[in-house]
Image (cartoon, rainbow, N blue to C red):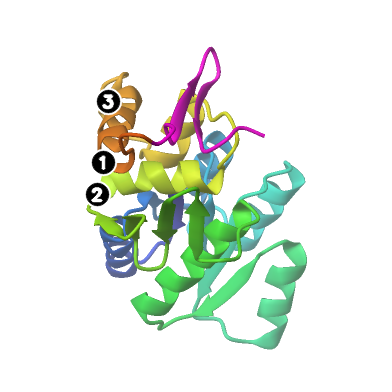
Amino acid sequence: MRVLVVEDYPPIRKAVAKGLREAGFAVDDTGDGEEGLWYATSNAYDVVLLDLMLPGIDGFTILNSLRAAGSGAHVLILTAKDGVSDRVHGLDLGADDYLIKPFAMEELLARVRALARRAYCVKNPCVVVEHLRIETAAQRVWCGPEEVHLTPREYALLEYLAMRRGEAVSRSDIWEHVYEFNSDADSNVVDVYIGYLRKKIERPGRPPLIRTIRGRGYSLGASV
């Protein structure tokens, strides 16, 4: 899943971005409010981590602008301001969750995973598609009783398809949600990684799990 981190304190921003990337998320990050608003309105993010005290534009203004523009991105506010009035104001403006600094990275990752699942109306952290089982919290995958070992990029692609299982997912949607803004990957990288996944999760004698939908993209599992 793709996450935007808008945090002006470099040590926190770098640590959070690093932790998210190590957990398999595609991450864009900035310490400037105006640039953060540009990122948030110019790209498709599953979750936005938003500090309140920012140079240029404050976090409340960014949040208000996002919701006014109709953005459905899930917003997790990160702030040292622990007053009830600030939390209420942020939630009333359309924030989905609130985390007070200092925080444990483990808790932040759990909250981000929960918001990412909520974006696709998935509450169960274990996603099952036919004989495939994906444990999103542990980022582990099984085909029947056999565990399948995936690279971080393979897992990110599979999880995104699983969150939209049964749908035709376009290459552009995959690119927007799985890869970072400054990614220098080749244009055919989606097709290449679809091929890698097929080799690892599909089994002889079983129908293919990943189907190519002509002119529309790919579908994991039976199409709706």
- The residues bearing labels 2 and 3 have C-alpha atoms spaced at a distance of 14 Å
**Residues at badges 2 and 3 in contact (C-beta under 8 Å)?**
no
> Residue tagged by mark 2?
150
Q: Crowdedness of circle 3 by 10 Å Cα count: few (<14), some, many (20+)?
A: few
> Residue tagged by mark 1?
200
Q: Quadrant of residue 204?
A: top left
Q: Residue at x 61, y 65 (%)?
A: 123
Q: Crowdedness of circle 2 by 10 Å Cα count: few (<14), some, many (20+)?
A: some
Which region shows up in magenta?
206-224
Local secondary structure at mark 3: helix
Of the 4 image quadrants, the one containing the C terminus is: top right
Q: Is 115 left or right of 208, judged from the image as shown?
A: right
Q: Is 140 left or right of 169, judged from the image as shown?
A: left
Local secondary structure at mark 1: helix
- The residues bearing labels 1 and 2 have C-alpha atoms spaced at a distance of 8 Å
Return the x and y of residue 156 as percentages of the image width and height.
36, 47
The numbered mark, 1 or 3, whose residue comes first in the sequence reads: 3
